[in-house]
Image: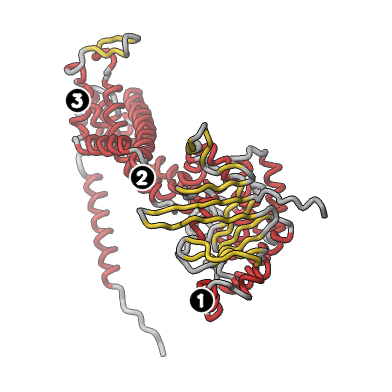
């Protein structure tokens, strides 16, 4: 007897709709009033590249701060010390709870609360001199990223079987060595995808820093279209660069995932 | 035979007690394990065998009595007339003198079989890698898994994983090997390979304390058997004697239940 498979009408319909939508988008951009030669000309403009570099280093530094604080906060949260636990809970509560743009403005206007910053008499300076737009952005994005990373890393640590910790201790490892060599490498596997997500959203969030005068990619694009009025063309320049950076990051993330997936049944190189 | 002075036991437990949230898990445990002896801990589940084993390895703390390993008090130090808990580093040092084999193997899944074995010697004993790898290969040969050196645990059967776990523990050159129901999580046809490795190990004179439900193994390989029930030692003695002519009613009941299974 012959097997007759049902015709997948639903799938054909979906393909047709997607092709239609794609065609529509391509057509409208081709016909629309976008002068692509302007976009192309400004793509490698020195000021744009400067903005791009600023966006990249700001994102990387904030993510590094975020991961460092996030790890500390996650460990504090799982500690037996109730004060550490409380501090960690308070930290994530505040820095996840308050809107990011508000945190950015608070840090930037810190001088209104503390006109001078002093480190026990060793160092003393006017707050406005220290809290530049870049410093305010680092503090705001770094602390915010840390609050999210804390929960992501904590989930990863909790996901590692308790027996792993015991086996590590049984061969004489101290807590910190067991954590570094045995538990964290295994947690990486589950932590990387959401952390990559976090990094990508951080790259885009750094554009908020343009409101306090940090010269990031978006700001450098705006500076030019305020003068040449080619708004859409310039926004396309920024779009291209943001997508480029995110693509590079995704490739990097994929490699890391393969690296830390070794030994686990699916995915990853043997 | 004039030199038969009683040697100090490698493990000496006196009056060991432990309670979880007010209910006693261990009460007044006295157990000695002498150098080169194989002692099997048997008894119904929940009788405290595993808890006692974990106290020796300090994965649990005991709150009454004392345990000495090779004359050294475990977990505490005597200062004047008081006992103070050891630091984490000191406890880690004491732990590295005992090897532990877990019921569920607990191999490190992100490391190959070889790396599982070299991890302790390299990170804890600070051996150089080449030397650690050479002795790891010897251990792999000893447990019959030389060709599995580059394999990850997920690619090995339960029996193979447990043999790697034994090699991992041996790599630390322990004075004492602790086995926590090492064959309970295995498919029946894989039990034999693991027991063979343990039998060979006993033959080399390794001191072993084995929590087990394998009565044939206890009878054949065990020098002595300790029967536990409800956190207490019910009976202890030479394996053949205790298992053939048990003195205590509770031992008889347990052996009858096990033999019926």
The residue under label 3 is A106
Q: Position of residue B181 (x, y in %)?
A: 54, 63
Which residue, as the protein is rendered here, is positioned at the far right? B1
Disc number for residue A164: none
Nearest-to-viewer mark from 2 and 1: 1
Q: Secondary structure beneath disc 1?
A: helix
Q: Name the subunit of mark 1.
A: B
Whether residue B16 sits left or right of residue A64 in the image: it is right
- Marked residue chain, label 3: A
Q: Secondary structure at mark 3?
A: helix
Query: Residue A12, relative to residue A238: is it above or below?
Result: below
Tell me the chain of label 2.
Answer: A
Residue at image coords 19%, 35%: A98
> Hey, which quadrant is residue B206 in on the image?
bottom right
Q: Position of residue A9 (x, y in %)?
A: 27, 72
- Judge left or right: residue B176 versus residue A32: right
Which residue carries the number 2 mark?
Answer: A154
Residue at the (31%, 29%) spot, across then down: A42
Front label number (1 vs 3): 1
- Same subunit, tags 2 and 1: no
Percent across and percent down for residue A131 are 27, 18
Mark 1 sits on what residue?
Answer: B253
Number of numbered discs visible in the structure rendering = 3
Is B32 displayed left or right of A116 in the figure?
Answer: right
Q: Are marks 1 and 3 on the same chain?
A: no
């Amino acid at each position: 007897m012959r097997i007759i498979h049902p015709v997948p009408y639903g799938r054909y319909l979906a393909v047709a709709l997607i092709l239609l939508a794609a065609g529509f988008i391509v057509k409208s951009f081709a016909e629309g009033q976008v002068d692509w030669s302007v976009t192309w000309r400004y793509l490698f403009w020195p000021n744009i590249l400067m903005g791009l570099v600023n966006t990249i280093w700001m994102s990387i530094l904030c993510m590094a701060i975020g991961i460092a604080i996030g790890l500390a906060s996650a460990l504090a949260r799982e500690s037996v010390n109730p004060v550490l636990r409380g501090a960690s809970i308070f930290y994530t509560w505040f820095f996840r709870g308050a809107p990011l743009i508000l945190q950015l403005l608070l840090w930037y206007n810190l001088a209104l609360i503390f006109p001078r910053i002093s480190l026990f008499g060793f160092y003393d300076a006017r707050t406005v001199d220290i809290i530049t737009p870049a410093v305010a952005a680092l503090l705001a994005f770094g602390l915010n990223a840390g609050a999210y990373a804390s929960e992501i890393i904590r989930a990863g640590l909790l996901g590692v079987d308790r027996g792993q910790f015991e086996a590590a201790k049984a061969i004489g490892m101290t807590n910190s060595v067991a954590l570094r060599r045995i538990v964290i490498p295994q947690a990486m596997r589950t932590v990387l995808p959401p952390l990559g997500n976090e990094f990508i959203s951080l790259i885009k969030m750094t554009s908020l820093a343009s409101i306090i005068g940090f010269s990031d990619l978006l700001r450098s694009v705006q500076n030019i279209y305020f003068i040449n009025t080619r708004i859409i063309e310039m926004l396309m320049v920024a779009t291209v660069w943001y997508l480029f950076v995110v693509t590079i990051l995704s490739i990097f993330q994929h490699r890391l995932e393969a690296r830390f997936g070794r030994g686990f049944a699916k995915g990853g190189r043997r | 035979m004039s030199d038969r002075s009683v040697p100090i036991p490698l493990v000496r437990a006196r009056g060991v007690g432990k309670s979880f949230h007010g209910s006693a898990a261990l009460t007044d445990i006295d157990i000695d394990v002498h150098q080169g002896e194989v002692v099997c801990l048997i008894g119904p589940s929940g009788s405290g065998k595993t808890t006692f084993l974990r106290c020796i390895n300090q994965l649990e703390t005991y709150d009454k009595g004392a345990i000495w390993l090779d004359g050294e008090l475990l977990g505490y130090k005597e200062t004047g007339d008081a006992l103070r808990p050891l630091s984490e580093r000191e406890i880690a040092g004491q732990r590295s003198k005992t090897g532990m084999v877990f019921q569920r193997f607990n191999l490190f899944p992100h490391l190959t079989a070889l790396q599982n074995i070299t991890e302790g010697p390299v990170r804890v004993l600070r051996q150089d890698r080449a030397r650690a790898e050479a002795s790891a290969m010897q251990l792999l040969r000893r447990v019959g898994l030389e060709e599995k050196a580059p394999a990850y645990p997920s690619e090995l059967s339960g029996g193979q994983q447990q043999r790697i776990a034994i090699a991992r523990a041996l790599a630390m050159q322990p004075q004492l090997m602790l086995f926590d129901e090492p064959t309970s999580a295995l498919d029946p046809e894989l039990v034999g390979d693991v027991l063979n490795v343990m039998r060979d190990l006993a033959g080399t004179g390794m001191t072993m304390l084995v929590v087990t439900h394998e009565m044939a193994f206890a009878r054949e390989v065990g020098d002595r058997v300790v029967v536990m029930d409800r956190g207490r030692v019910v009976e202890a003695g030479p394996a053949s004697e205790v298992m053939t002519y048990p003195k205590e009613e509770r031992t008889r009941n347990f052996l009858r239940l096990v033999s019926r299974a």
